[in-house]
Amino acid sequence: MAGATSAAADRKIVAFCCRECAYAAADASANARTPLPPTVRLVLMPCTGRVSPLHLLSALAEGADGVMVAGCLLGQCHYREGNFNAVDRVAFVQRLLKSVGVEPERCQMFTMSAGEPPRFVAAVREMDRVIVGLPPLPRSEASGNREVPLAAARGAA
Amino acid sequence: MPLTHRGREILSRVPGGTLQSTVGVGCEIVRREELCVGCGKCATNCPSGASERGDYFDVNQLLDAPAGSRRGALGSALRRLMRHDPDGPVHVPERVTVYRTILYDDEKCLGCGTCARGCPAEAIEALPPKAEAAPTGAADPAAAGAPASEGVCA
């Protein structure tokens, strides 16, 4: 697939995609047989406003090297302002990561419309470039009281 | 224990009115930050503005949160990723509402216990005023009858 190197092949990116735009764009790009980087796993969300900090952090803690949130253009959310919530939550997670010494670039937000498959592909490739450029994300062993993961973090694998 | 704005205003209108000590009249407010879920109900209900929802978040609150809670889940995910202790409080964007530290100002607190009654996480407890600190008579009903968790006083 698309000339993946062995170092890049075991990285994982979880992309939380809005059903109204990014997932439709992903669908269209798949129909057009545009290859996506092999690192990316798509998760369908009803709206990026559904994405919580817990989704993003548990995806990282459970094996993803990067997470991306792909939503509608700002101001074009199907539910009016869901993607604004997502923008702020992604910013919050970035600050959390930064404060404990993890690269904040591992969590990013992209916006696009349903009619722009190339923009979706470009966003995924950009994320892939960033993550492959970073070392694998080190994790400590599961702490004893771990209770999490929401289905979202697992469903991607 | 300071008065509210309204109380101070009334006091200024009372001829010859002087502020008598109210220390010990209010409940003793015990806050357990690690149980806080950041809902801000205490800040909404607080009559004196002693509790306030801040615009930053202390990351240690996540790491200390009890397992099984939502914050505990987020905290354990973060603990697996962290490379060093948190640098300090993080500034929280506007639309993130629950991951905020509630600021509590001891000086402004009246000890009314409204926050404790409204707290859904039982993170705040209002203890009856200590009998020895209370002026005679003022705190008797609260000290005598009320159970500790109720916070009925003032």
Image (cartoon, coloured by chain):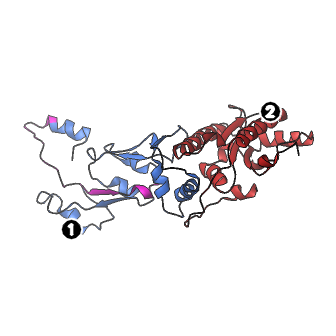
Look at the image and tell me whether residue A21 can be seen.
Answer: no
Q: Is residue B116 left or right of residue B109?
A: right
Foreground disc of the pair 1, 2 = 2
> Residue A36's quadrant in the figure?
top right
In this view, the residue farthest toward the front is A6
Type of amino acid under label 1: Ala
- Residue span colored magenta: B12-38
Measured along the vertical axis of the image, is residue A126 above or below residue B70?
Answer: above
Residue B78 rendering spot, x and y as whole percentages: 56, 53
**Rendering colour (chain A):** red
In this rendered view, identify the residue nearer to me: A111 or B59: B59
- Secondary structure mainly formed by the magenta segment: loop
Q: Which mark is residue A119?
A: 2
Supply the letter of whichever chain is blue: B
Query: Element under label 2?
Result: helix
Type of amino acid under label 2: Arg
Query: Element under label 1?
Result: helix
Question: Are discs 1 and 2 both within one chain?
Answer: no
In this rendered view, identify the residue nearer to me: A93 or B114: A93
Structural distance between the alpha carbons of marks 1 and 2:
70 Å
Chain for numbered disc 2 = A
In this view, the residue farthest toward the right is A32
Residue B36 rendering spot, x and y as whole percentages: 44, 55
Badge 1 local density, few (<14 within 10 Å), some, or many (20+)? few
In reply to whether residue A148 is colored magenta, the answer given is no
Chain for numbered disc 1 = B
Q: Is residue B30 left or right of residue A1?
A: left
- The residue depicted at 78 percent of the width and 38 percent of the height is A125
Look at the image and tell me whether residue B79 can be seen.
Answer: yes
Badge 1 is on which residue?
B144
Residue A95 rendering spot, x and y as whole percentages: 55, 41
